[in-house]
């Protein structure tokens, strides 16, 4: 079975850092791209970043550029999201998901499997 397990969320003060992990199993990791989305209370789920695991190409939302870094360890079938300089508005449940190559990284409907989400809370 395809599984995506997101972890690493928690409570952090504004300006702090967290690293999220997305452990994938049940499919050939190099055949898919992985993305991170987030959903704040009362808001829609939006794309944060994505990586093409085969060649390392990365994509970021404007809100993440310069603060977040996505990376993958293909030997461990794991994608990471390093989040620095966290802001109050980064508070959300973060989800990782899988999409086929050639799809659009920020389109939620292009992702076919989703992890369960991990909560990130940024406090003042």
Image: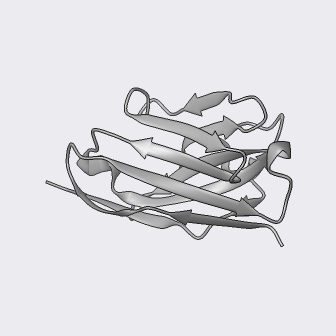
User: Does 54 sit left or right of 9 as displayed?
Assistant: right
In percent of width and height, residue 76 lies at 68, 53
Residue in the image at 39% along x and 26% along y: 66
Report the quarter where the C terminus lies.
Answer: bottom left
In percent of width and height, residue 40 lies at 40, 59
Q: Is residue 111 above or below residue 6?
A: above
Residue farthest left in this picture: 124
From the viewer's side, name the closer residue of 64 and 16: 16
User: Does 37 sit left or right of 14 as displayed?
Assistant: right
Residue in the image at 50% along x and 45% along y: 81
Where on the picture, by quarter, is residue 26?
Answer: bottom right
Where on the picture, by quarter, is residue 101?
Answer: top right
Q: Is residue 50 above or below residue 27?
A: above
Residue in the image at 47% along x and 66% along y: 118
From the viewer's side, name the closer residue of 63 and 85: 85
From the viewer's side, name the closer residue of 77 and 108: 77
In percent of width and height, residue 105 lies at 68, 38
Where on the picture, by quarter, is residue 96?
Answer: bottom right
Residue in the image at 50% along x and 33% along y: 61
Q: Is residue 79 above or below residue 92?
A: above
In percent of width and height, residue 4 lies at 68, 64
Report the quarter where the N terminus lies.
Answer: bottom right
Q: What colour scheme was applied to this rendering of the protein?
A: one colour
Q: Is residue 34 above or below residue 44?
A: above
Residue 44 seen in the current view: no
């Amino acid at each position: 079975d395809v599984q995506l397990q997101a972890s690493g969320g928690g409570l952090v003060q504004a300006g702090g850092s967290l690293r999220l992990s997305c452990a994938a199993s049940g499919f050939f990791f190099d055949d898919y791209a992985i993305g991170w989305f987030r959903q704040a209370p009362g808001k829609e789920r939006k794309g944060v970043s994505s990586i093409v695991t085969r060649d390392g190409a990365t994509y970021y939302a404007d809100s993440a550029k310069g603060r977040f870094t996505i990376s993958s360890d293909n030997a461990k079938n794991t994608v990471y999201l390093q989040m620095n300089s966290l802001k109050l508005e980064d508070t959300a449940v973060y989800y990782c998901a899988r999409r086929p190559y050639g799809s659009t990284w920020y389109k939620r409907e292009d992702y076919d499997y989703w992890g369960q989400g991990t909560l990130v809370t940024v406090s003042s």
